[in-house]
Image: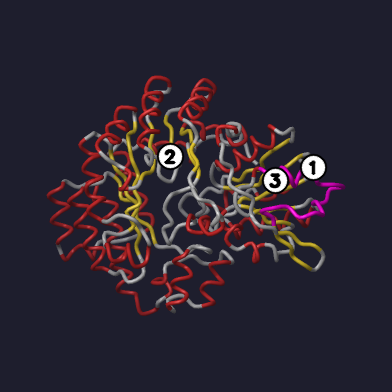
Amino acid sequence: MKILFVHAASEHLGIEHLSAFLKSRGHETSLVFDPAQFSGQENARIPLISGMFDITPKMLDAVASHNADLIAFSSYTVNFRWALDMAERIREKIDTPIVFGGPHATAVPHRVIRYPQVDAVVVGEGEETLLEMMENMRGGRLPESPIRNVWRKKGDRVEHSPPRPYIRDLDNLPFPDKELFYSKVPAFSKNYMVLASRGCPYRCAFCSNSLYHDLYSEEKNHVRRRSPGDVIEELAASKKKYSIEMVSFWDDVFTMSGRWLEEFAHLYKSEIGLPYDCYTHPLSIDERRAELLADSGCFRVKIGMQTVSDETRRRFLDRAGDSAAVEKTIDILHRHGVSVGVDHMLGLPGEGPDEQKAAAEFYSRTRPERINSYWMLYFPGAKITGDQRESGELTDEDVEKIEEGLSQTSYIYADPSAGRELYKLKSYQTFFDIEPLLPASIAGRLAESRALGKLPYHPLLRQIIVTLAAIFQNDRRYRQHLKLLVSKKHVP
């Protein structure tokens, strides 16, 4: 049987794992890919330029020519409308069954399945579900019998089954099918994306992990980890095959297990030796783990700061730890020579310019090398979305738009009375972009000055500042991002 994945904008580890699993069971997989440059899905949104890169007609022809038995989309809220539109156009040309999966479909399968171009929705992990679906298809149609993890149409009804258990033994899974994406965009191989685990121990209210904790509520442990040897074996094989320049670990909390990291770090240093970055949580860093990261080649650790307000973190975000823990973590990493990137949200419930001024002062004191600031977005199924609906900050209409992928924007954008406050928040965003470029003394004085809320903001200016900061700091990841943007692509 043949399954065709249709995706846009970025490499997708989930699809690579699904493809490898299905191939290992004797099925054929392929990909139709749209780089979607300047569409806002992965890079800046510049409509005048993105139209020059529109390859939709070629994609539709490519989909039809594959003669697949099943067509699959992985949907995030940011790409859901694109996926729906593409699926509708595909349906106009061919009658192949179309299945949606991914975080958005998992969050609101009851909405997604209503669309006529969607025949089935897979919630949660998809390997075993897609395998069962494909092995029981007959005459080009989906199986008649129920399949766990699946919502599907049956006449005028919609039937669904409960999720199957997590896949526990990750070492027993094949390595991801990197060639699926590398054959389309060879530059993807320069920054090798890898997962050493699945799941997160935390359930922050703004994150999709809160959704998965609810979906798999009967599971005792939501984190499953590959052995260090299995991860190293994948990296070693890929290092021989591709011209990898750096490695990015996409685990939610890479440093969660000190024992695992101890074994991994020694193997990685001796057998791989490439610079890498990873995500962590302030409660999962200590002196020994920082030492292991630095010694094994980790050049940057990314931390989800979100806010410097402990009250906001506790009241709205259900975020473990506090600002003191973050400050200690940054200090430990810096003392071991590891740079730090922090994720910071603007437009959080209850926060305005005062909280951003406090954040500016915090960052000017702790000096992270990168402050990735972005606006609070509401995702379907996330706890904070339901909480804000109950409090009245989000209306039923707001939530419906979020669940339909029509809006994720911070509430402040929709408030006509917030114009002056919004301008100030954007001004702080400019400061967060330039702060790593400034000497500590100047950054500190600017953070305390009245001028901080008057800095100019423009999307193009911001892109220039971020690029200059990346060049100034010799940011490996951003350098790879720029190479990817101008690289040759064999699409669709």
In the picture of the structure, the residue carrying the numbered disc 1 is 67
Q: Which of the pair 392/470 is nearer the observer?
A: 392
Location of residue 144 by image quarter: bottom right
Can you say whether 403 is above or below 330 in the image? below
Q: Which of the pair 189/271 is nearer the observer?
A: 271
**Gap in Å between the C-alphas at discs 2 and 1?**
35 Å
In the picture of the structure, the residue carrying the numbered disc 3 is 130
Identity of the residue drawn at 28% across and 66% down: 311
Q: Which SS class for mark 3?
A: helix
Q: Position of residue 490 (x, y in %)?
A: 62, 36
Foreground disc of the pair 1, 3: 3
Label 3 crowding class (10 Å Cα cut-off): few <14, some 14-19, many 20+? many
The quadrant in which the N terminus is found is top right
Q: Which SS class for mark 1?
A: loop
Can you say whether 154 is above or below 226 in the image? below
Q: Which of the pair 382/375 is nearer the observer?
A: 382
